[in-house]
Image (spheres, rainbow, N blue to C red):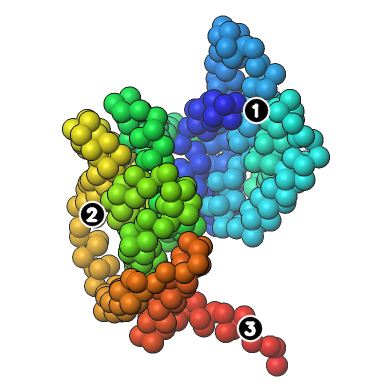
């Protein structure tokens, strides 16, 4: 409860800087003076917003009895607000310091796990639990801030120009708010219109979808700084090439996942949630195509519209999707329950993707021509044949049934791409071979 409450104050303190900061810093990464000035301006804006957030937070603790009773726990958790601000993770992402980010993240996750075993012994150790959670999730911020002086100049680079950042920052902020409302809308409406049992089925259906979407969309954060840099430098060829590779990656990853988890929805739900959650199978099958739509809209939105300064179009598309989701939920949930919410989500994600494709129709015409659709179709055909051949397979347990079928299906997909010498797969293979080569 404490971390959930603090997350809203953190969102206000950060505004849209985590997303905008990556683009803004990536565009001036080659000029240390401009980079230092940009970092200082954004950090000052964050510190001012953090002060406002803390003021509102402590007023809430003071005036609301429910929160005042747990004021110590909430105060400990509120350290996340300041740590998020001084952590300036967006600077490290903009400069593509991914090795450092991964190292400190793993270090503090391991530290948090060790402290959890040492300090949290029973339900009465809730304060220790809150402290360990903050250290594990945000402790690296201290290291980030100390190390920041190696990347930028920390002495004041006046005159500061805060106004130039305000419009994009607030656009990203409202985009974050709209996305938060939009992604939670189906669950909230299910709870209001139906009951907690139906919400439980729906949550079981979206469990695997959420994991797969996270894997697909993680590519966006990695590519954003490089794409922003290419766009700022006018390197159109490199920009289009990287976007094309991103499209190919999403299609090659998301479509097989969509097919496999649709065909094996029943055993997956039964394995992850138990036989009592079989009503979640239908919603899960309906939701699976959203993996493809979200993957594609993540490219058009985060990897194309954002680096080119058109984030307002992303905001419009998300609002449009939220409206579609709300109207369809209102219409379908009373009669179809969790399946109705799934249909609403599917149509909403399709609407967002379609609208962003319309915004980028001229650009996408040239990109689509570079995608290797023949290899993609052959992969889908070969994988589907394997699933058809496995349709009567019954093993001793659900685990082995899923493990064997997944190994054969995804193995066939990869093998087909290797035989066809698909460019992305071959580039990965070549890099692995170079890594394994012994120096002469």
SS class, disc 3:
helix
Of badges 3 and 2, the one in the foreground is: 3
Residue 91, how many percent across, how many down?
57, 47
C-alpha span from label 3 to label 1: 45 Å
Q: Position of residue 427 (x, y in %)?
A: 47, 79
**For numbered disc 1, what is the local secondary structure?**
helix
Secondary structure of the residue carrying numbered label 2 = helix
The residues tagged by marks 3 and 2 sit, at their Cα atoms, a distance apart of 40 Å
Q: Which residue is mark 2?
A: 357
Of badges 1 and 2, nearer the viewer stands 1
Say left or right for 254 vs 28: left
Q: x, y (%) of residue 327?
A: 20, 33
Is 280 in front, or is 92?
Answer: 280
Label 3 sits on residue: 436
Q: Nearer the viewer, residue 69 or 166?
A: 69
Q: Quote the CA–CA distance across marks 1 and 2.
A: 41 Å
Residue furthest to the bottom: 440
Q: Residue sitting at 67 percent across and 22 percent down?
A: 73
Q: Residues within 10 Å of mark 1 (few under 14, many from 20)?
A: many
Indicate the quadrant containing the N terminus: top left, top right, bottom left or bottom right: top right
Which mark identifies residue 77?
1
Task: Categorize mark 3 by other alpha carbons within 10 Å: few (<14), some (14-19), many (20+).
Answer: few
């Amino acid at each position: 409860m404490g971390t959930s409450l603090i997350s809203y104050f953190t969102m206000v303190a950060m505004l849209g800087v985590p997303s905008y900061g990556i683009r803004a810093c990536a565009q001036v990464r080659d000029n240390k003076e401009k980079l230092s000035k940009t970092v200082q301006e954004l950090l000052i804006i964050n510190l001012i917003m953090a002060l406002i957030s803390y003021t509102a937070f402590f007023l809430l603790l003071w005036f609301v009895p429910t929160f005042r009773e747990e004021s110590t726990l909430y105060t400990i958790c509120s350290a996340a607000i300041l740590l998020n601000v001084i952590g300036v993770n967006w600077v490290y992402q903009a400069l593509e310091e991914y090795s450092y980010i991964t190292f400190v993240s793993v270090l503090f996750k391991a530290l948090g796990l060790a402290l959890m075993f040492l300090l949290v012994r029973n339900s009465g150790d809730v304060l220790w639990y809150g402290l360990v959670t903050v250290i594990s999730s945000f402790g690296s911020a201290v290291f980030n801030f100390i190390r920041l002086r190696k990347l930028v100049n920390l002495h004041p680079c006046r005159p500061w120009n805060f106004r130039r950042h305000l419009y994009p920052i607030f656009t990203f902020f409202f985009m974050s708010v709209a996305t938060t409302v939009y992604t939670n809308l189906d669950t909230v409406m299910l709870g209001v219109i139906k009951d907690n049992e139906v919400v439980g089925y729906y949550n079981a259906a979206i469990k695997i979808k959420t994991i797969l979407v996270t894997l697909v969309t993680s590519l966006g954060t990695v590519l954003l700084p490089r794409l922003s840099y290419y766009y700022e430098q006018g390197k159109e060829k490199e920009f289009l090439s990287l976007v094309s590779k991103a499209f190919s990656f999403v299609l090659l990853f998301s479509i097989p996942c969509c097919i496999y988890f649709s065909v094996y929805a029943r055993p997956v739900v039964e394995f992850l949630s138990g036989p009592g959650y079989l009503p979640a199978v239908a919603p899960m099958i309906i939701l699976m195509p959203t993996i493809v739509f979200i993957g594609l809209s993540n490219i058009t939105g985060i990897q194309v519209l954002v680096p080119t300064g058109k984030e307002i179009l992303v905001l419009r598309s998300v609002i449009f999707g939220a409206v579609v989701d709300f109207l369809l939920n209102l219409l379908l949930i009373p009669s179809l329950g969790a399946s109705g919410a799934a249909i609403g989500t599917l149509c909403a994600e399709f609407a967002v993707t379609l609208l962003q494709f319309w915004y980028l129709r001229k650009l996408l015409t040239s990109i689509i021509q570079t995608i290797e659709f023949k290899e993609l179709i052959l992969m889908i055909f070969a994988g589907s044949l394997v699933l058809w051949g496995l349709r009567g397979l019954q093993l001793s347990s659900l685990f082995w049934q899923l493990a064997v079928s997944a190994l054969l299906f995804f193995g066939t997909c990869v093998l087909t791409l290797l035989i066809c010498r698909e460019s992305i797969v071959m580039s990965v293979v070549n890099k692995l071979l170079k890594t394994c080569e012994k120096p002469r």
